[in-house]
Amino acid sequence: MKNSKIKNFITFSMAAILISFLLSQCSSSKKVTQLNSDEVANMVNSSRFEFVAERVNPLRGTSRILTSYYDVIVKKDSLKCFLPFFGRAYQAPMDLSNGGIQFTSTKFTYNVDGKKNNSWVITIKPSDNNDVQQLYFNIFGNGSSSLNVVSTNRDAISFSGHIKKLKE
C-alpha cells in the first residue's frame, strides 16, 4: 500500500514537472509588436516589409516551429529570400551549400489583391530565378501572415509568421 502511494506521488510529480516545462516552452520569448491596420496597409501598398517566418508547414511531413531566424525582405526594387526547405526536391541543386530557399531577385512582379476582411493577398513572381515560381503572402491587419512558396523543382511549402517594418 505504501509503495503504491509513493509510486502515485512520483508519477504525479513527474507529470506536473512535464506540464510546467511544456507550458514554459509554449510562451514565446520573441516580442512581436502588434501593428495596426493602417501600418500594415502602408507596408503592403509601399511594397516595403519583412516577413519573419516562425513556423514551417511542409507538404510532406509535420509542421515545425523554427528556432533560427528566417525571413523574406520585400522592397520595391529587390526581393531577398532566406527560408528553410523540408520536403521532396525533384532536382538536386548544383551548389550544395545553397540549401533551403535562398535567392535575391531584382526582376519580379508584385501584385496586391485588394483588402478583403482586413487582409491582403500579395503575389510575387520572380522572373530571374529558375526555381521559385511564385510567393503568395496572406497578410492580416494585425501583421500576422502566411507565405506559400511554389517551386519548379521542389514540393510547395508554406510558412506562418508576421511582417514588420524595415529599418530605414
Image (cartoon, rainbow, N blue to C red):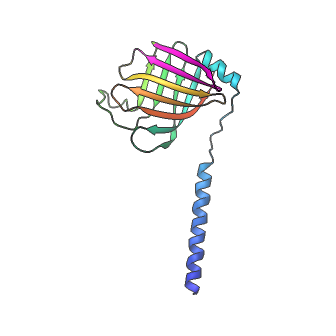
* Residue pictured at 46% horizontal, 38% vertical: 57
Question: Considering only vertical position in the picture, is 73 above or below 57?
Answer: above
* Residue pictured at 32% horizontal, 31% vertical: 96
Left or right, 6 with reference to 132: right
* Residue pictured at 66% horizontal, 18% vertical: 42
Question: Hey, which quadrant is residue 61 in on the image?
Answer: top left
* Outermost residue toward the bottom in this view: 1
Residue 127 on the magenta segment:
yes
Observer-nearest residue: 98 or 44? 44
Observer-nearest residue: 31 or 5? 5
Residue 79 position within the rendered picture, expressed as x and y whole percent measured from the top left: 49, 19
Q: Where does the magenta region start and end? A: 108-128
Observer-nearest residue: 31 or 126? 126
Residue 18 position within the rendered picture, expressed as x and y whole percent measured from the top left: 57, 61
User: Quarter of the image containing the N terminus?
Assistant: bottom right
Question: Considering only vertical position in the picture, is 112 above or below 10?
Answer: above
